[in-house]
Amino acid sequence: MAWRMMRDALRARLIQVAEGVLDDRAYVVIAGPANTYAQYVTTHEEYSVQRYEGASTIFGPATLEAYINKYTELVPYLATNATGIPSSTASLPEQTSKAISLQTSALLDNPPILQHFGDVLADVESGIYHAGDTVAVQFVGANPRNNLRLECKFLTLVRQMKDEWVVARTDSHPSTMYQWNRTSKVLGTSKVNIRW
């Protein structure tokens, strides 16, 4: 019901603003707002009943009217001869720095004595591997929460093709597994198992 109401309001506004382009035969299709998690949008009546959809309308009972208002304000800017830019409200204040985390940080990370982060503890077994075989390797590691590697990888598998190394898999591939294990809480040592 909500999207029909929005469609009808936008259709009326499009016909009004785009004279000569759209007429009474115009059919408007709404394909759903994207790039946000808006949950459900309901009418006042559906919201007041508080069934699943109403209870999931997270911005309150006037969400539909707010959407209709904002979208109909944007309609004139769809015209081929539109000038200017739509008005915008002020940006919301930054709140990320004020957020609290209930997740404890990793306080201590050290390599074992006489070893370094990244040292190989158990190397890949030499030989020929076939489809379905599991390849495993183990390294001296650290708690991954100490470096979230944003926009980076925890693991990259490369394959030698002739004279160059080519990326075969990364930790984003479903066939790879990255497993961190704390080996000593007192010394802060860890190991990382990688399988593919």
Image (spheres, grey):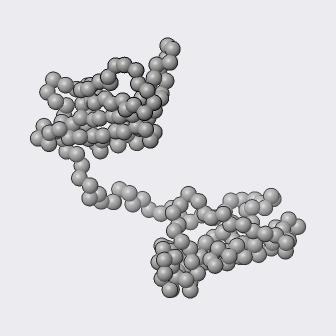
Left or right side of 65 for 142? left
Q: Is residue 51 above or below residue 159?
A: below
Rendered location of residue 127, percent (x, y): 37, 19
Residue 132 in view: yes
Residue closest to the far top? 163
| Towards the viewer: 193 or 81 | 193
The quarter of the picture where the N terminus appears is: bottom right
Q: Which quadrant would residue 143 be assigned to in this image?
A: top left
Residue ID at (70%, 73%): 7
Q: Is residue 5 above or below residue 186?
A: below
Rendered location of residue 179, percent (x, y): 30, 40
Residue ID at (14%, 42%): 185
Q: Is residue 190 above or below residue 163?
A: below
Q: Which quadrant would residue 45 be assigned to in this image?
A: bottom right
Rendered location of residue 38, percent (x, y): 53, 66
Residue 60 in view: no
The quarter of the picture where the C terminus appears is: top left
| Towards the viewer: 184 or 36 | 184
Residue ID at (59%, 76%): 64
Q: Which quadrant would residue 96 be assigned to in this image?
A: bottom left
